[in-house]
Amino acid sequence: MAARDLGRAGTCGPELVAAVLRGDGRRRAGRDAGPDRRQFAAPGTVATFSWLGPGYRGRGLGTEMRAAVLHLAFAGLAAREAASEAFAGNHASSRVSRALGYEPNGTSWATRRGEPALMTRWKLTRDRWETTRRDNIELTGVRDCLPVLGL
């Protein structure tokens, strides 16, 4: 999988993880996790979350990571739907979700620094992804991962 040759995908326990590496290829600048085999096989839904180091924010890397993971989920694994969440005040994360076609899908609560925090939920259906999908993301080796995901 490549998103402008910035990402690498691998397995980390039961989930797939795409990491954005610095130019030296050693340190992670961020990550985006995609399908979890415990939740994916039956309903075909992926839940993504991402993290990007402070020095790497605002460069479009978060959008690139998420686009690559969505391409893997929908084009490579035939997902039906993708879900994501962001803390209510995390406008940058919400902009990434909107830019990739996600639609608001309610709210939930989480704990942040020991305090209750409101989360905004996002949903992207396969049909909606088809209208915004990119054609410059290449998937390789997906077939070898299918048994790990129960597919």
Image: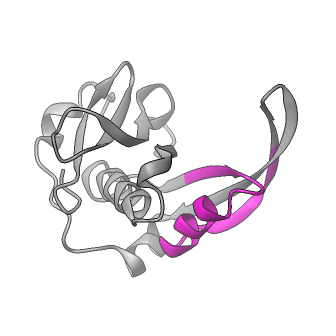
The quarter of the image holding the C terminus is top left
Q: Is residue 150 left or right of residue 8?
A: right
Residue 12 in the magenta stretch? The answer is no
Q: Is residue 61 visible?
A: yes
**Side of 144 relative to 19 (left or right):** left
For the magenta stretch, what is the residue range?
83-108
Please indicate whether residue 69 sits to the left or right of residue 58 in the image.
Answer: left
Q: Position of residue 121 (x, y in %)?
A: 70, 54
Q: From the top left corner, tell me how far across and down residue 95 is, in percent.
A: 59, 69
Let me know if residue 52 appears in the view.
no
Q: Residue at horizontal 81%, vertical 45%?
A: 108
Residue 54 horizontal side relative to residue 59, left or right: right
Instruction: Decide which of 76, 41 is in the foreground and name it.
Output: 76
Residue toward you, 107 or 31: 31
Taking 45 as reference, is 37 above or below it?
above
Snapshot colouring: one colour
Residue 68 spot, x, y in % from top left: 31, 56
Q: Quadrant of residue 137?
A: bottom left
Instruction: Name the residue: 51% across, 74% down.
Output: 99
Most distant residue in the front direction: 55
User: Which residue lies most toward the bottom here?
Assistant: 131
Image quadrant of residue 19? top left
Determine the residue positioned at 40% across, 41% down.
31
- Measured as percent of width and height from the top left, residue 64 is found at 34, 61
Can residue 89 be found in the magenta stretch? yes
